[in-house]
Image (spheres, rainbow, N blue to C red):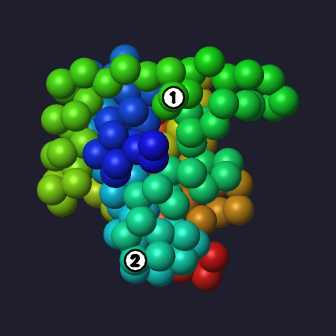
Amino acid sequence: MAYSDRELIARIVQCEAGGEGDNGMKAVATVITNRVNVSNGEYARISQGGNVRNIIYQPGQFDCATETLRNRYNPQNIYNMTPTEIHYYIADWALSGNKLNEIGDCLWYLNPFRPTCSSIFPSNGTGTFHARFGNHCFYRPTQTYSQT
């Protein structure tokens, strides 16, 4: 059985930011819904008018959406998650159109596993550093993004 949008978001939020508290998980959910709803560029084409599944399963985007990373089993994946009430609450919050204001229109995040964030991400220059929230760095699109 395929997961519903609610289930997918709850699982990805738990997997990607489960240790980041409510606002950290809301920040990740905001990026997901920003990608689903962006009006131009790569994610607009991928989401095909608002498809959460297409965004989450786009190859190379969310480590938690795959069971294999670098040719090895990835035990931290959405299939191994057991979302709780808070994860479903955040999924419902995001699907209702809410955004974490501190994240704004960011389309990317990453945990750099170091105290500083790169000024540009991804490496093709389509995102610029916006804010650090917990362990994650968040990036908003540059004008270059719309050409992707």
Q: Residue 116 placed where, x, y %?
A: 54, 30
Q: Which mark is residue 37?
A: none
Q: Position of residue 126 (x, y in %)?
A: 59, 65
* Front of the two marks 2 and 1: 1
Q: Which residue is mark 1?
A: 79
Q: Can you identify the residue that label 2 sits on?
A: 49
Q: CA distance from mark 2 to mark 1?
A: 26 Å
In the rendered image, the quadrant that contains the N terminus is top left
Percent of width and height locating residue 129: 48, 50
In terms of depth relative to the viewer, which is nearer, 2 or 138?
2
Q: Secondary structure at mark 2?
A: loop
Residue found at x 51% / y 28%: 79
Q: Secondary structure at mark 1?
A: helix
Residue 42 percent location from the top left of the image: 58, 72
Above or below for 8 versus 143: above
* Quarter the C terminus occupies: bottom right
Viewed as shown, does residue 51 lie left or right of 71?
Answer: left
Residue 18: quadrant of the picture? top left
Relative horizontal placement of residue 111, taking residue 85 as reference (left or right): right
- In this orientation, which residue lies closer to the viewer: 57 or 70? 57
Residue 33 in view here? yes
Residue 23 visible in this rendered orientation of the protein: no
